[in-house]
Image: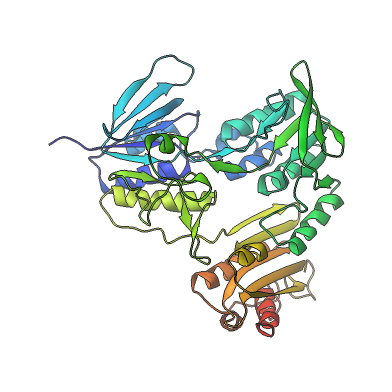
């Protein structure tokens, strides 16, 4: 009886989570993982803290090396190998070693596509100049750190005010660089409502970031192939280095070329078991489509938590078990210096696009009893359906101790609670951790008056 073979395309969170789960359940399964970069299983979310110097060495971001996978898990993890084609009829993939000519076919019984996401590169003049960096892989983070260490840039421009933009702006400031941030939208953090995002913008300005909103990128000025300035619709900003925080898109071109259907934002369509419509072919992580538990619609989001969970589900099923991935709510958090930022569920514009009517309430409170030292300010915004009071989303911006409170709201959304039920949650209390009414419950009390 021949041994079945699993090929994994992509060696980071989703791919290696799936490979590890499949190995635990099927010791006899042959598993080969192809990764085009030099690293497997690393913490991409920690890259800004490596660039900023909080993490001293890049290898500390690596969770499991290719050698570990080979020796401890009997998973043949081949780095610097790129899959350039998928033949679903012959059940094989076309592989080439990076930097070398020639390619060959590798057969599979099961195929997991975990190709991740690609940074959106603006289509403007000069975008290929030396000194312009996207930040999506550990290797890209290493290149940014080397540029900062070796070139000692004085001026940096961050293009885009999302999670990566904020985190990289802080990292560069920590390295003593003058930072400007440009954003084409009227606000930073487009996953927040405008009123909550304005609090983040205030923190950026207070930290000395030059913030320019509603200024689309026009071009990069260069000299002898090196970046010299970033030009927006309204100004020219000197720049020794530029960071692209303009978002990501699913890296699903291989899947599309093979004939697999694509869904929201071009992500690979899968069912709740992470199966594509082709038997034995699976997809997980930042290339795969999810399902939004609040809107009840297909949804795409690129988050490490989602990638790891989807990879686990795919691996369990490939290994002969049964697991499902119920969906997501876009729960995410970040920080900018001492300001913590978190969100979950739907925001106002998403609710309006669905044609639903909602009410919202925003409260300001303290992270702990106000009589204790270190009691910082926290703002909590909750959104609920008008009439029914069904909770639809929440956002939090505040001092240390704020962000993880988003998990209360996330669990309430998972449970389908209304705002009255949130008020009655038996949340822990002690003066060092919370006012007697937790700020989330206080927001629910205000919101229940309106819905």
How many numbered discs? Answer: 0
Q: Residue at x 74, y 68 (%)?
A: 379
Comparing 51 with 37, the one in front is: 37
Quarter placement of the N terminus: top left
The quadrant where residue 372 appears: bottom right
In this picture, residue 242 sits left or right of residue 410: right
Quarter placement of the C terminus: bottom right
Q: Residue at x 68, y 35 (%)?
A: 122
The residue sitting at the front extreme is: 355
Q: Is residue 274 above or below residue 433?
A: above
Q: Position of residue 310 (x, y in %)?
A: 43, 51
Q: Position of residue 428 (x, y in %)?
A: 60, 77
**Is the residue 201 above or below the residue 217 in the image?**
below
The location of residue 251, given as percent across then percent down, is 50, 38
Extreme residue in the left direction: 1
Q: Is residue 293 above or below residue 2?
A: below
Colouring mode (rainbow / by chain / secondary structure / one colour): rainbow
Camera sees residue 92: yes
Q: Quadrant of residue 145?
A: top right
């Amino acid at each position: 009886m021949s041994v079945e073979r699993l090929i994994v395309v992509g060696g980071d969170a989703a791919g290696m989570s799936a490979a590890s789960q499949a190995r635990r359940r099927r010791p006899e399964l042959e598993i080969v993982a192809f990764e085009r970069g030099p690293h497997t299983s690393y913490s991409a979310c920690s890259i800004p803290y490596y660039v900023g110097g909080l993490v001293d060495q890049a290898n500390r971001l690596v969770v499991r090396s290719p050698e570990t996978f080979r020796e401890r898990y009997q998973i043949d993890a081949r780095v610097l190998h790129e899959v350039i084609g998928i033949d679903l009829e012959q059940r094989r993939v076309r592989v080439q070693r990076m930097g070398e000519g020639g390619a060959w076919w590798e057969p599979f019984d099961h195929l997991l596509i975990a190709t991740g996401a690609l940074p959106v590169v603006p289509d403007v003049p000069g975008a290929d100049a030396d000194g312009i960096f996207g930040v999506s892989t550990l290797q890209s983070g290493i290149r940014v750190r080397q540029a900062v260490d070796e070139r000692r840039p004085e001026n940096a421009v961050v293009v885009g005010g999302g999670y990566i933009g904020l985190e990289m702006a802080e990292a560069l400031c920590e390295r003593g660089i003058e930072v400007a941030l440009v954003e084409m939208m009227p606000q930073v953090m487009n996953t927040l409502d405008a009123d909550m995002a304005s609090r983040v913008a205030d923190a950026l300005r207070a930290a000395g970031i030059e913030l320019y909103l509603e200024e689309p990128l026009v071009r990069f000025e260069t000299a002898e192939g090196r970046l010299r300035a970033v030009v927006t619709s309204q100004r020219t900003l000197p720049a020794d280095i530029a960071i692209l925080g303009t978002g990501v898109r699913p890296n699903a071109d291989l899947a599309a070329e093979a004939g697999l259907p694509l869904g929201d934002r071009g992500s690979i369509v899968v069912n709740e078991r992470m199966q594509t419509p082709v038997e034995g072919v699976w997809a997980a992580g930042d290339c795969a489509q999810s399902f939004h538990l609040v809107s009840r619609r297909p949804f795409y989001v690129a988050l490490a938590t989602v990638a790891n969970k989807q990879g686990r589900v795919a691996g369990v099923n490939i290994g002969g078990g049964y697991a499902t991935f119920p969906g997501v709510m876009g729960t995410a958090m970040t920080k900018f210096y001492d300001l913590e930022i978190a969100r979950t569920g739907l925001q106002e514009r998403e609710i309006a696009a669905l044609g639903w009517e909602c009410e919202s309430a925003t409260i300001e409170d303290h992270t702990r009893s106000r009589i204790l030292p270190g009691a910082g300010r926290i703002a909590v915004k909750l959104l609920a359906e008008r009439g029914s009071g069904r909770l639809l989303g929440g956002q939090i911006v505040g001092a240390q101790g704020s962000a993880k409170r988003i998990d209360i709201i996330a669990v309430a959304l998972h449970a389908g609670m209304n705002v009255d039920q949130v008020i009655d949650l038996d949340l822990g209390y002690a003066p060092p951790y919370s006012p007697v009414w937790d700020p989330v419950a206080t927001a629910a009390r205000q919101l229940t008056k309106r819905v």
